[in-house]
Image: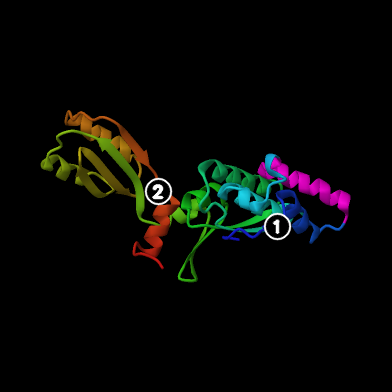
Amino acid sequence: MQDVAVFEELTVYENIDYFCSLYINNKDTRKKLVEEAIDFVGLNDFRKFYPKKLSGGLLRRLNIACGISHKPKLIILDEPTVAVDPQSRNNILDGIRKLNEEGATVIYTSHYMEEVELLCSRIMIMDKGKVIATGSKEELKGMIKLGEKITVEIFGLSSSRISEIRQLPNISSVEYIDKTLVVKYNKGKHNLTNLLDYFRDNDISFGRIYSELPTLNDVFLEITGKELRD
C-alpha cells in the first residue's frame, strides 16, 4: 500500500510471520519463508525492532517483506518508494526487479517515471481515471513528436547564428540562455552530427555537449499535458 500497513505492537519478525501465517500454516515452512523475506529486504539487524523505531525506508522494506513472504505469484505495489532515502529506494527497486526475475508478476504504480522506465516491460499511462496509452517504453516513446535534446556550453553565440541553427534539419526549438544552447529535435537521424558539422564549418568553439533521448517523463507530459494535477 502507499501507506505503510504493519502492526505497531509486533516486532519486525513477528509482523512478517503474522502476514505469512495468513497463507502458510506449517510452522517450519513459515519460519524458512520469514527468514528468506528478512534477508531479501535486508532487515537482519532489525528483526527485534518495533515499527516505531524504524526509519521510513526500513518501514517500507518491512511492508514489502510482509507482502512477499508467502511467495505470491502476483504482487501489486503502490508507490513503494515514497518518502524514503536514496539507499532504501535503490534496495527496494533492486528487490522488485529480483522478485520479477524469480517469476512473480508485478503491477507497479508510480508517479516516478524513471522508476517505471527502469522496472517495467509493459506500461500503461492513465489520466483522470482513463487509460490513454499502453505499450513498451520504446513503443510509448514512438508515440510522441519530441526526439533528441542536445545541450551545449557555448560562449557569445550571436542571434544570426541562432537563426541559422534553427534552419538545420529536424529542429523543433532552439534556446540560448546563460551561455547554454538547448536544441530540441523532432524525430530524425544524425542530429548531433549535423550540429557538430555546423559548428566546425563556422569555426564555433564550444565546451561540454551532451545528448538526451526522450524519457517516459517526456512521454507522460506530452500525452497528458503540462497543467497541474490534483
N-terminal of the two: label 1 or label 2?
1
Q: Does residue 109 appear left or right of residue 180 in this picture?
A: right
Tell me which corner region of the image, top left, top right, bottom left or bottom right, holds residue 107: bottom right
Q: Is residue 31 magenta?
A: yes
Q: Residues within 10 Å of mark 1 (few under 14, many from 20)?
A: few
Q: Does residue 219 appear left or right of residue 172 in this picture?
A: right
**Residue nearest the viewer, comparing 47 with 78:** 47
- The picture places residue 27, in percent across and down from the top left corner, at 87, 52
Image quadrant containing the C terminus: bottom left
Query: In this orientation, does residue 71 appear?
Result: no
**Residue nearest the viewer, comparing 114 with 125:** 114
Magenta highlight range: 26-44
Tell me which corner region of the image, top left, top right, bottom left or bottom right, holds residue 157: top left
Secondary structure category for the residue under label 2: loop
| Majority SS type along the magenta span | helix
Up the image or down, 228 lies above or below 186; here it is below
- The picture places residue 156, in percent across and down from the top left corner, at 14, 34
Query: Label 1 is placed on what type of residue?
Result: Glu
In the rendered structure, find residue 9 and report the number of the disc placed on it: 1
Image quadrant containing the N terminus: bottom right
Query: In this orientation, does residue 161 appear?
Result: yes
Q: Residues within 10 Å of mark 2 (few under 14, many from 20)?
A: some
Query: Label 2 is placed on what type of residue?
Result: Pro
Kindly report which numbered mark, 1 or 2, lies closer to the viewer in this rendering. Answer: 1
Secondary structure category for the residue under label 1: loop
Seen at 57% across and 47% down, the residue is 55
Q: Residue furthest bottom?
A: 129
- The picture places residue 46, in percent across and down from the top left corner, at 68, 43
Q: Does residue 46 appear left or right of residue 227 in this picture?
A: right
Q: Does residue 198 appear left or right of residue 95 in this picture?
A: left
- The picture places residue 6, in percent across and down from the top left corner, at 67, 58
* Residue receiving disc 2: 214
